[in-house]
Image (tube, rainbow, N blue to C red):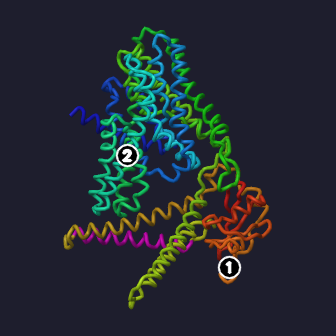
Amino acid sequence: MHIAIFLTALAVGVLAVTALSSRIDVPAPLVLITAGVAISYIPSMPEVHLEPEVVLLGLLPPLLYSTAIQTSLVDFNANRRSILLLSVGLVVATTLGIGLIVHALLPDAGWPASFAIGAVVAPPDAVAAVAVARHIGLPRRIVTILEGESLLNDATALVSLRTAILAVAGGVQLWHIGLDFVRAAGGGVLVGIAMYALVGFLRKKVTDPVFDTGMSLVVPFAAYLLAEELKASGVIAVVVAGLLLGHRAPVLQTAQSRIAERMNWRTISYVLENTVFLLIGLQVDWLLADVRRSPVSAGRIVAVCVATLLGVIVIRMVWVFVTRYLLIRPGPDPATGLPTPWTNTAILGWAGMRGVVTLAAAYLIPKTAPHREVLLLIAFTVVAGTLFIQGLTLPWLARVLRVPSPDPVEDALARATLLQQASKAGMAALEKMEYDDPHGVVDIVRQRVDMRNFAAWERLGTAAGEESPSELYNRVRNTMIDAERTRILEIRKSGTVPSDVVADVLTMLDVEESMLGIAEAERNEARETERSRRAPGGVCPDLERYPAEPVIDAEQAAGLVCQDCLKEGTRWVALRRCLVCGNLGCCDSSPRQHATRHFHDSSHPVMQSSEPGEDWRWCYLHHQTA
């Protein structure tokens, strides 16, 4: 009962503190750690020890899997060089650098223990970094790199730690280190691929979303345990399985299964992530009590903790800039034609917050290691220090460096364009079908597809005080749904209709209402984007210099062509006109992207859509729409 009461109180506390952090607009990890520290000093509070087995077997696999299935394999592959340099190269560099610092300030700890704590504090935690990054709206590429880094750096750190622990015990040779890395990485990849193949085969045979979701809950633990049993990396096995299953989900799973899995893992991730940070705070009381009994002087303990904290921050900043200019050398951004700004690199270097894996890995250091209590305090100092110093200043730094957040208007434009292309493919498939349609079903289908596309384009509208057709539809339909649900509940109370039938009808209304709610939220976000954008205020100078041309109609658009596409024998999806010289080129959704090529050749910054009824403009230099 005591354990059950504690776990229930823990869950309630996590939810309450998370809700509070949303109200005060502070990232949840920071508030949860603060709350945990305060709770740990309550006299009646039991002493909470975060056992490494609980984290490495109970928390890490589901957290990694939840992130992996939501990570784009395409984006991961596009940024693989940056991800590998951070998740492998930086972890090794941090392990060595911190090992030197700790040994210089605490020589009695010995080299193996010094490198062990270096491996412990080396891997940043995406749970913390991404939580802050999404809270303040960092560019998606930075978030992708942070997620990718965190998916693999734990494996590198844990292998390095295992090697250092063997050295503490006096049983490691140099060639064992290389063999350990190869076996951990290669074995983990193979187990992950095997798990993907098995689950993918089973999903092709399964249509029940409940069974599919149940199978999904088993995958991260099965992949992790199988890999660890084979002396491979369980972390890499979970990541590979999650990336592949997430990428292939639209082909392997039914729509109901995908929706159910996505919602379940979002809930699991939400609860576990926030619980982790509260548990970190709860360690403070007993950690400090152990340190007070240490023979090492208080001054030396403070010095080594502060030096390690500064070391992990400085090493990361130096590493990201050195690798940017010597190894990565980023090319032009596809959207702007300009090199990726150094400000993005600075933000990536500053987003190196540590988390629960660092604290859990510290407990793996053998109890026979010299000054183990100081090493544990070092780990906690790095976790808490990076979270508070970097986590609290990251929003300020993003504003100072004017790092732009994702633009909801651009997202709405991309969404509308993608739906338009999908509709064309659907209509082409419809034309190839053979059917007898005496009831006009095809006309209804065409009308519904048109309505969906029109609603997507209307989300680009930002005229204040005007209600678009899709907004009017949402308002009318929501009012009707409320009335329909009220009537259904009245009928349910009478008991004249079976409860299963009532539940099915209510579910139908819930699905429709949720779709209307998502559309409304996206539309509101697009309309308020100017208030949340961190780019310089107002429209950029180039968009002001080149105003929009009159909107063309379908008759005028019929005579427009992309001359470059005609010469090359390719087809265009949509046309864009340069507002400087009038050149007409195909959009980025077209195979040859002649409008963007024209910008690279001429440096003319602003183009406008040349599709019927569209008046939006795009500035290549400032990455802004109007």
**In which quadrant will I find the N terminus?**
top left
Residue furthest out toward the bottom: 438
Badge 1 is on which residue?
Answer: 557
Three-letter code, disc 2: Gly
The residue at which mark 2 appears reads as 192
All told, the count of numbered labels is: 2
Comparing labels 2 and 1, the label whose residue is closer to the camera:
2
Name the foreground residue: 360 vs 512. 360
Of the residues shown, which amino acid type is indicated by label 1? Answer: Ala
Structural crowding at the residue carrying mark 1, measured as other residues with C-alpha within 10 Å and reported as few (<14), some (14–19) or many (≥20): some
Check disc 2 and report its element: helix, strand or loop. Answer: helix
- Quarter of the picture containing the C terminus is bottom right
Residue 498 position within the rendered picture, expressed as x and y whole percent measured from the top left: 20, 70
Position of residue 181 relative to residue 437, above or below, is above
Tell me if residue 473 is in the magenta stretch: yes
Work out whether residue 164 or residue 271 is closer to the camera in this orientation and state it.
164
User: Tags 2 and 1 in contact by the CB under 8 Å rule?
Assistant: no
Q: Magenta part of the protein: which range?
A: 468-493
Residue 233: image location, x then y, percent: 38, 37
Q: Secondary structure at mark 1?
A: helix
Camera sees residue 552: yes
Name the dominant secondary structure of the magenta segment. helix
Mark 2–mark 1 Cα distance, whole angstroms, equals 51 Å
Q: Is 52 placed above or below 402 here?
A: above
* Left or right of 492 on screen, residue 370: right
Name the residue located 39 percent from the left edge and 40 percent from the top edge.
Answer: 188
